[in-house]
Amino acid sequence: PNDPAGNLAAAWHSYNFNSCSSESCFDQQLAPVIAQVPLVAGEIGENTCSHGYIDRVMAWLDAKGASYLGWTWNTWDCSSGPSLISDYNGTPTNFGVGLRDHLKGMH
């Protein structure tokens, strides 16, 4: 696209169950995009009731200077889809703990 104002950015959703879910795929598919425009992962998540996948995604995105948001602020069963919280008081799931702790550790 033509972007004379320089306002173009790319968006991406990343889950452990996507076809592109490895650092080698990120390097091949996303790094060239990041070299051209800012990238925000509008949704990152996993259905493993843990945070191993998003730990890798956040590390990769941090190294590239990209942005990301966790998904989702719902109380779903974490094995059926990403859920950051287990109740609407904000009690984090293990997945939510991973995102929270990573963000708290950033300077």
Image (cartoon, rainbow, N blue to C red):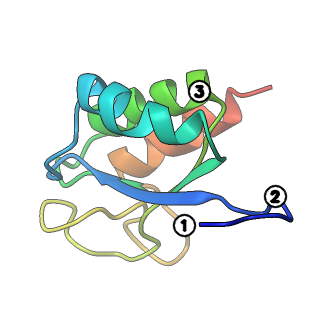
Pinpoint residue 24: horizontal percent, then vertical percent.
26, 22
Q: Looking at numbered disc 1 in the image, what kind of residue is underneath it?
A: Gly
Q: Looking at numbered disc 2 in the image, what kind of residue is underneath it?
A: Gly
Residue 59 placement, left or right of 16: right
Tell me the CA gap for discs 3 and 2.
Answer: 19 Å
Q: Residue at x 69, y 62 (%)?
A: 8
The relative height of residue 8 versus residue 57 in the rendered view (above or below) is below
Image quadrant holding the N terminus, namely bottom right
Q: Quadrant of residue 106?
A: top right
State if disc 1 and disc 3 touch (CB < 8 Å).
no
- Residue 35 in sight: yes
Q: Which residue is mark 3?
A: 64
In primary-sequence order, the first of circles 1 and 2 is 2
Q: Quadrant of residue 89?
A: bottom right
Q: Residue at x 74, y 64 (%)?
A: 3
Q: Secondary structure at mark 3?
A: helix
Is 55 or 94 nearer to us in this picture?
A: 55
Is 17 or 32 nearer to us in this picture?
A: 32
Is 97 or 56 nearer to us in this picture?
A: 56
**Nearest to viewer (mark 1 / mark 2):** 2
- Residue 42 in sight: no
State if disc 2 and disc 3 touch (CB < 8 Å).
no
The disc at residue 32 is: none
Residue 105 placement, left or right of 94: right
Pinpoint residue 90: horizontal percent, then vertical percent.
54, 67
Q: Secondary structure at mark 1?
A: loop
Q: Which residue is mark 2?
A: 6
Pinpoint residue 34: horizontal percent, then vertical percent.
56, 38
